[in-house]
Image (spheres, grey):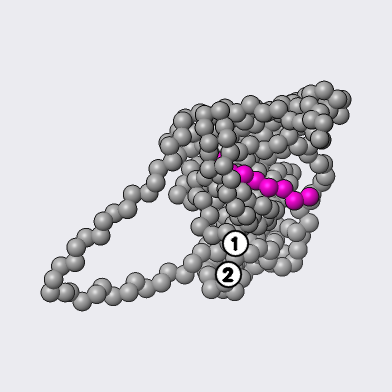
């Protein structure tokens, strides 16, 4: 099913269920270096000799060099590395001119003015007859360069017979010039007290998913709550936008295409929005 996403000032995810499954660490038992242009992992079977040279050879495929981020030196341990750009020589300074050049006028970035806390309450309906299935509360809090997004949903009516208790999702991280950069993302249900999480380690270029499953991070990567705000904090400059979205169990790759604009009438007035389709 194709869906449309209208971006005004803020958006919130709809109520959804979670699938269950088990994901192992089979790729750690591989006899090849696993990773991509951002980094990788050298399995224990290959940790011998000059691991720096092995990592450099892997990163050289993208004309990059390796930086070891974890090496315990113990037998049976993996080595984690990231791929970084090679240091390029700075160009020589230009020759002096007879007339001084006027200093360029600094362009100040457009500041995003948001209240420190935003709360939105939603009610969910299903089908053409509008069966009431649940409600949710969405909250954004931010201070300085830190943010927290949380949403709490609960099934109502007949839907409560299938989905008992509340479902919670939380994203916390930093506000950067490129948008939101999540540090942690978690989901939980109150009916069985089950909790899953994903931890983003931007220094090592790895994300730790549920059951300690580790995968390399490839920019840009967001979580399901933070990605919605990317259209606001860092609007795409072209008609297509590509994002990686990490849940608690897997990393997905999405391509969004802008199909037009729309004016949405809200209680406080009309808001110009963009429509993006996945």
- The structure residue drawn at horizontal position 83% and vertical position 44%, both measured from the top left corner, is 21
Q: Residue at x 62, y 44 (%)?
A: 6
The reply, left or right, for residue 140 in relation to residue 5 is left
Q: Which mark is residue 59?
A: 2
Residues shaded magenta:
1-8
Asked whether 232 or 42 is in front, the reply is: 232
For label 1, the residue is: 39
Corner quadrant of residue 131: top right
Whether tag 2 and tag 1 are in contact, CB under 8 A, the answer is yes
Q: Where is residue 94 in the image (x, y as percent from the top left)?
A: 24, 75
Task: Residue 75 in the image: state x and y as whole percent.
Answer: 68, 58
Circle 1 sits in a helix, a strand or a loop, which is it? strand
Residue 138 horizontal side relative to residue 163, left or right: left
Q: In this view, does 97 lie to the left or right of 255?
A: left
183 or 167: nearer the viewer: 167
Question: Total number of numbered labels?
Answer: 2
Disc 2 secondary structure class? helix
Residue at 13 percent of width and 71 percent of height: 99
Using the image as rendered, state which of residue 115 and residue 27 is in the foreground: 115
- The answer to whether 262 is drawn above or below residue 104 in the figure is above
Does 250 sit above or below residue 87?
A: above
Q: Can residue 208 be seen in this view?
A: no
Residue 221 point in image, percent of width and height: 60, 52
Name the residue nearer the viewer: 179 or 88. Answer: 179
- Image coords of residue 248 (percent x, y): 70, 43
């Amino acid at each position: 099913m194709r869906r449309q996403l209208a971006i005004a000032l803020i958006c919130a995810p709809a109520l959804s269920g979670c699938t269950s499954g088990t994901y192992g660490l089979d790729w750690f038992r591989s006899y090849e270096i696993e990773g991509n242009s951002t980094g990788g992992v050298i399995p224990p079977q290959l940790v011998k000799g000059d691991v720096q040279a092995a990592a450099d050879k892997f990163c050289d495929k993208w004309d990059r060099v390796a930086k070891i981020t974890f090496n315990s030196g113990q037998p049976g341990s993996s080595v984690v590395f990231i791929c970084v750009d090679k240091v390029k020589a700075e160009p020589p300074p230009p020759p002096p001119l007879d007339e001084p050049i006027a200093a360029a006028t600094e362009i100040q970035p457009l500041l995003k003015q948001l209240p420190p806390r935003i709360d939105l309450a939603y009610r969910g309906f299903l089908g053409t007859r509008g069966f009431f299935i649940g409600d949710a509360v969405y909250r954004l809090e931010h201070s300085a360069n830190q943010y927290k997004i949380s949403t709490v949903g609960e099934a109502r009516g007949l839907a409560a017979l299938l989905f008992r208790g509340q479902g919670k999702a939380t994203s916390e991280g930093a506000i950067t010039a490129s948008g939101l950069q999540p540090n942690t993302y978690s989901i939980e249900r109150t009916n069985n007290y089950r909790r899953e999480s994903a931890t983003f380690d931007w220094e090592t270029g790895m994300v730790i998913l549920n059951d300690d499953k580790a995968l390399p991070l490839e920019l840009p990567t967001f979580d399901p709550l933070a990605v919605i705000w990317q259209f606001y904090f860092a609007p795409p400059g072209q008609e297509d936008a590509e994002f990686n979205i990490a849940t608690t169990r897997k990393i997905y790759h999405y391509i969004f295409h802008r199909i037009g604009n729309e004016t949405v009438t809200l209680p406080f007035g009309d808001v110009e929005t963009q429509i993006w389709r996945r």
